[in-house]
Amino acid sequence: MIVVLDIGIIIACIAGLWWGAVQVVDSATRIARRLGVSDLVIGLTVVAIGTSAPEFAVTAVAALKGQSDISVGNVVGSNIFNLGFILGGLALFRGVATSPRLVYRDGGDLIGTTLLLVFFLRDLAVTRLEGAILMALLVVYIAVLIVQRAEAGEPVPPGRFNRVDIPRFLVGIVVIVGAGHFFVEAAGSLARLMGVSEWVIGVTIVAIGTSAPELATSLVALHRGQHGMSAGNLVGSDLFNLLGVLGLAAVLSPMSVDPAALSSVTVLAAMVVVVVVMMRTGWKLSRWEGALLVAITLVRWGFDFSR
């Protein structure tokens, strides 16, 4: 009975996280355009923050509750899910186009950031100093984006702003934070009842649930034929997860993790390198490359649950 209740809470929280993220992304985008912010900066900051809001809520709540395995596992698992299952699935359905800027700048930054996390987790902990370093790198990354955008001189597209967007944004944040709180509670309870570690729950079930906005955004882009945008959104979201979400969580509360974290973050680092190389070959992700990424993700999940 308790298991059914926990699963019901998790499903309800996933729906809440998804709905809240949609409200945040839509309203924040219109607010940002009203303030004269360009599409590129909106996409790589406002939208990235919005779609990563569930990861932030769950990761921060778990860190403050001392559930570091769920906190770090959520970020690592979400990034694996984004690149392996969502991006791989999109490429499997139809090849995803890429670009030199996406591969060399954003892909290179993602590789460097992931390797930095591998280094930080060598002692199975993420300290406040290391979290501050991650957040500082996020500030530098966003500054570079803004400077490059200004140098390009691209126009800011018009957007329709309504005063209801401000309360809509605030309501979305409240729903995300509330859903994140109950998500962590239910996931921790389910882990104990199933006899598996909080790390496994964090890197699989919680990670999949908090990636719902990224999945929704990618499906919308696929429906509109904007396949290249899907890759950019997922890479940007992964960067924000590592630098912003994990960085701020570590600043709020230093975290220590299960030894299993080393193998999972190593898989993530390898997958990031493979994805960037695939995006460079022919400037697209082919169907067979997408199938390979999905297969790697499924094998990884099977390995996690079998331990």
Image (cartoon, rainbow, N blue to C red):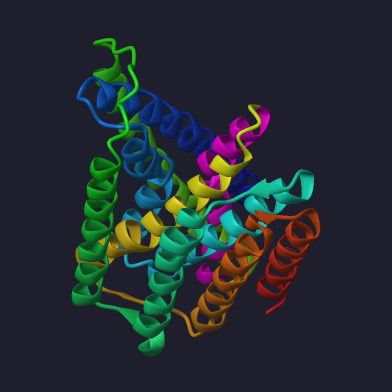
Image point (53%, 43%), residue name: 214
232 or 162, which lies in front? 232
Q: Main secondary structure of the magenta part?
A: helix
The C terminus is located in which quarter? bottom right
Image point (28%, 58%), residue name: 141
Q: Position of residue 264 (x, y in %)?
A: 56, 76
Give above or below for 89 relative to 266. above
Image point (61%, 69%), residue name: 277
Image point (24%, 75%), residue name: 130
Q: Is residue 254 left or right of residue 223?
A: left
Magenta stretch contains residue 222 = yes
Q: Position of residue 290 (x, y in %)?
A: 74, 57
173 or 2, which lies in front? 173
Q: Position of residue 76 (x, y in %)?
A: 49, 66
Q: Residue furthest bottom?
A: 123
Give above or below for 104 relative to 183. below
Magenta stretch contains residue 299 = no
What is the magenta range? 197-223
Where on the picture, by quarter, is residue 197? bottom right
Q: Is residue 245 left or right of residue 151?
A: right
Q: Residue furthest front?
A: 152
Give above or below for 303 relative to 149. below
